[in-house]
Image: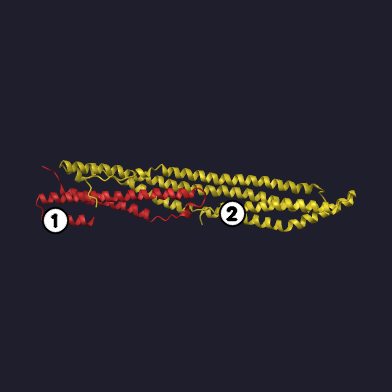
Chain colours: A red, B yellow
Amino acid sequence: MADCDEEALREDANGSWQPWSLQVQKWGEIIDDLELDRRAFSVAPGSNELFSTFNTALRSVRTYLSEGEEVLEGIARALLDSAIEYMEMEGYAADEIARVEREIAAL
Amino acid sequence: MSYVDVLREQIILQLDEAEIRVRDAIRVAPGLIRRAVEAAANHYLGTVAALIPDAAVDWLADQITSAALAALQDCLVRIAVLREAAAYLGSPDDLRAVAEKLGGIGGSATAMDINKDALDGLMSWDDGEPTRRYEVAVENQVDDVAKVAPAMSSLRDALRTHADDIENYYLELLALVTGAVAAILGVVAAILSLIAGALTFETGVGPVIGIIAAALSLVTAMLGVVVSGIAAVQLFMNSTQGTSNKLDALQIDMLEWRKPSFAQIK
């Protein structure tokens, strides 16, 4: 017999994974808002290569954060989905299940 | 105005001053040299009664004038090179501001505490495969979040190092320009004082030798300037390359957030 606390799964999703996902999303937005043009690196020899390398690295990190944001949100979604499954098995009222479905939609 | 802007302004002011002095010298030197040589010739004619032909006076004046003007023109070329070096600028303030934000992300990532024991859902869930997949997903996130801070540190450190390099470059350039300008003004002063000295009939043929020596010393000084200039730029290139290598070492290609099977990713 499975042992599961639906409320605890929802709390993991809404209280941890979703906020973590939003936090990672915020990091990405900070990177998106960075204002650093070519001139800031100076036009001295070698600085162009550094500018290029830096931007490549920054873009990769930005992609990494986007992936992380999706994964963390995906875990929250999976937890809420699991909670619904257990709620359905245990005969929860439709409006209670609908509420969790709205939580998934809000992710 | 940033620290580098202040340094750059000091450099430009010094170069402006040097250029004005050199151009003034170029303007007045030919006439003064001619008069000085004539005066010296007349002086020796009167004192040692040796005839100095006009052609010899012309030749001597031309030689000295050519040497002086060549030296002064060389000064202008060096000033132009140093002006170009001063135009490299960049913005350490902007670099540091961005570094600060990246460092903030790293700090926030470090503070993100994904702890299995604190996840009541996980701790209370016992349903075989789904539970195991959730647990693996949690462990993956702990590892992948932990990679954010080092990546941010690398980016932050690269910017900070580059900002420092730019400032050091300008500090070195300022010292270089200060030395070069002193050398240039020294040559200008030597040429003009030589002429004045000859006109007062006090120094005899010494000034003629002196002006050539001054021209030669200028060349020597300028060689030093060029070497120093190259050294300053080379140092900057080396440090920039080092910073670039640090970013390469970040192994960005390896940075991939794993996608656990438990997660429902859109």
Instruction: In the displayed orientation, state which residue is furthest to the left.
Output: A91
Q: Amino acid at mark 1?
A: Glu
* Mark identifier at residue A96: 1
Location of residue B215 in the rendering, given as x and y in whole percent from the top left corner: 71, 48
- In the displayed structure, does residue B115 sit left or right of residue B66? left
Report in which chain the residue with disc 2 lies.
B
- Look at the image and tell me whether residue B200 can be seen: no
Frontmost residue, B70 versus B140: B70
On the picture, is B243 further left or further right than B20? left
Q: Which residue is mark 2?
A: B83
Query: Is any part of residue B47 visible from this angle?
Result: yes
Residues under numbered marks 2 and 1 in contact, where contact means CB atoms less than 8 Å apart = no
Please tell me whether mark 2 sits on a helix, a strand or a loop: helix
Whether callout 2 and callout 1 share a subunit is answered: no
Name the outermost residue toward the right: B49
In the image, B154 versus B61, the foreground residue is B61
Q: How far from the left and from the top, in percent, is residue B93?
A: 47, 53
Category of crowding for the residue at label 2, using alpha-carbon neighbours closer than 10 angstroms: few (below 14), some (14–19), many (at least 20): some
| Disc number lying in front (2 or 1) | 2
Q: How many marks?
A: 2
Q: Residues within 10 Å of mark 1 (few under 14, many from 20)?
A: few
In the picture, measured across the screen, residue B122 lies left or right of residue B187, that is left
**Residue B95: where, in percent of width, then height?**
45, 52
User: Quadrant location of residue B245?
Assistant: top left
Residue A106 picture quarter: bottom left
| Left or right: B266 in relation to A98 | right
| Residue at the (63%, 44%) spot, across then down | B224
Could you tell me which residue is drawn at 26 percent across and 41 percent down?
B139
